[in-house]
Image (tube, rainbow, N blue to C red):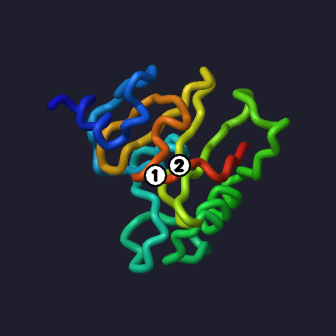
Amino acid sequence: MTNREYIERIFPKLRGTDWEIISPKNPKYNCVAWSLCETNNWWEPDPMGEYYWPPGLPRGDYSVKAYQTMFESLGYRDCKDEDFGTEYENIAIFADQGRFKHVCRQKESGVWTSKLGRDEDIDHPLEAVGGNVYGNPTTFLIK
């Protein structure tokens, strides 16, 4: 099974869409770091402090609100539909029952890009990574 077939098995909504693998597997960083164009740290509010999380923000909270607060501390703000556009840095937070699952970033080209856990980075249509693994996009932020 190829990497592409494996990814499509996990994310079946990718099948038949225009998506591509843009970098190899790398366990050093996650989707949060990738959404911030950072590839040196794994960002997570783990309670033990093993991963990077901005100083002063609480740990152990995996809610969408906790992640939104973290992004807001970096200058992002809640997106109103009329504000959304490629002239901004756009991110979409995916959740399932209020729990953070994933975040992706929109490139200047309008294409969305994601880091798949410890695996590859991909470019994809926004909704194509939604579903059982990552839930659905629930929160949009711009900077």
Q: Amino acid at mark 1?
A: Tyr
Q: Residue at x 59, y 62 (%)?
A: 67
Q: Quadrant of residue 109?
A: top right
Q: Quadrant of residue 56?
A: bottom right
Q: Nearer the viewer, residue 90 or 9?
A: 9
Q: Residue at x 32, y 43 (%)?
A: 10
Q: Residue at x 64, y 56 (%)?
A: 71
Dot 2 falls on a residue whose secondary structure is strand
Q: Between marks 2 and 1, how big is the CA–CA gap?
A: 9 Å
Contact flag, marks 2 and 1 (Cβ < 8 Å): no
Q: Residues within 10 Å of mark 1 (few under 14, many from 20)?
A: some
Coordinates of residue 51 in the picture (x, y in percent): 40, 66
* Residue 134's disc number: 1
Mark 2 or 1, nearer chain start: 2
* Residue 123's disc number: none
Q: Residues within 10 Å of mark 2 (few under 14, many from 20)?
A: many
Q: Residue at x 47, y 29 (%)?
A: 124
Coordinates of residue 125 in the picture (x, y in percent): 52, 29
Dot 1 falls on a residue whose secondary structure is loop
The residue under label 2 is 103
Q: Taking 109 as reference, is 121 left or right?
A: left
Foreground: disc 2 or disc 1: 1
In the picture as drawn, the residue positioned furthest to the left comes out as 1
Q: Taking 28 as reference, is 46 left or right?
A: right
Q: Amino acid at mark 2?
A: Val
Query: Which corner quadrant holds the N terminus?
Result: top left
Coordinates of residue 118 in the picture (x, y in percent): 31, 49
Coordinates of residue 72 in the picture (x, y in percent): 70, 58
